[in-house]
Image: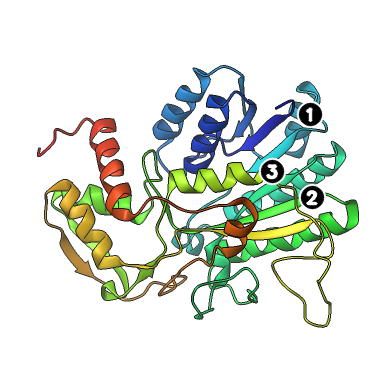
Amino acid sequence: MTSRIIITGCAGFIGFHVAARLLDEGYRVLGIDNLSDYYDVKLKLSRLEILKQLPKFTFYKLDLADRDGLESVCAEEKVASPDRIIHLAAQAGVRYGLKNPDTYIQSNIIGFYNLLEIARKVECEHLIYASSSSVYGGNTKLPFSVHDNVDHPVSLYAATKKSNELLAHVYSYTYGLPTTGLRFFTVYGPWGRPDMSYFIFTRAILAGEPLPVFNYGDMHRDFTYIDDIVEGVVRLIYHDPEPDPGWNGDQPDPGTSWVKYRQYNIGNNSSVHLLEYIRVIEEALDRKARLDMQPMQVGDVKATRADIEDLKREVGFVPKTSIYEGIPKFVEWYLDYYKIPRGG
């Protein structure tokens, strides 16, 4: 553990949990976050306050679209090999992109490009970055595999994540930068994002308000508990990508390459019906939901499920948390954080 781990988006949902895990294990962590107001900044500050109480944590408020600022931080902190980078900062959300497309280009394209430039200049030994299950877009063959073609995104968010994967490959090829992309599948759990469905459902049920249920409830998602996501990320930090000796340009494998580049799914490897998901939230809250059935929204997909065989084979990743364990843990945190009496 001689190297330092740099985490962008450290005040975000996944970034916070990854940083807390690494700090708890004794790593040095340099955290970067712009504390955007996409959702409640108070929640981000609460996460950040926890990290600041832990030893070996340093924080900079910085937007990755600010190249000069990023370079200044790296110079001040003497970022260099063997430091490793976990890039989790991004403009998230599918529907938000319909009205605010510029933020996705600034955060997910320009910000990622700036980070790639920094990573190559400091000779970063491994760049791990967040992609998304959204890249599967119009694909319908389940489970989704990293070895499938993903050239038909259906949201701007998905398109920017696919762009990240393409840019990463160029840097792996041109500069020898080892890059690993992680396609996360519907992450949930304590300290989560208020724009996510489980957060919205919980808030609406407690308030007695109608629950927006898209595609009239006929949706399936590979819901993945945050602890399982973190376990997958941590196992990959020192599992550097290696060239695939069997890669063939006549039949190119999208998930691997002849250079130091890989893609992995991190999911639960199961697909849960949305109405069952809501039922488990109802049970945890001991309240009934008022369902507001609505048509499919632009940018949504009907079903997701992750093929995680590569991650299982290479680093022994096996998700352990079902929604029947994970949702009650989230609800317990939610009631505690927002100071809502049990049964109140």
Disc 1 target residue:
79
- Toward the bottom, the furthest residue is 250
Mark 1 and mark 3 lie on one chain; the one further toward the N terminus is: 3
Q: Is residue 344 above or below residue 206?
A: above
Q: Identify the secondary structure beneath mark 3.
A: loop
Task: Choose mark 1 or mark 2, whichever is in front.
Answer: 2
Question: Would you say the residues marked 1 and 2 are in contact, meaning their CB atoms lie under 8 Å apart?
Answer: no
Task: Choose mark 1 or mark 3, whichever is in front.
Answer: 1
Which x, y percent locates residue 60? 63, 26
Query: What residue type is disc 2 on?
Result: Pro
Query: What residue type is disc 3 on?
Result: Ala
Q: Is residue 278 above or below residue 62?
A: below
Q: Is residue 296 above or below residue 92?
A: below
Marks 3/2: CA–CA distance: 22 Å
Which x, y percent locates residue 246? 81, 71
Please state if 68 lies on the left or on the right of 196 as rendered. right
Please state if 341 lies on the left or on the right of 26 as rendered. left
The label shown at residue 65 is 3
Query: What residue type is disc 1 on?
Result: Val
Q: Give the residue displayed 54% in from the left and 39% down from the top.
A: 15
Disc 2 target residue:
178
Q: Identify the secondary structure beneath mark 1.
A: loop
Q: Residues within 10 Å of mark 1 (few under 14, many from 20)?
A: many
Q: Residues within 10 Å of mark 3 (few under 14, many from 20)?
A: many
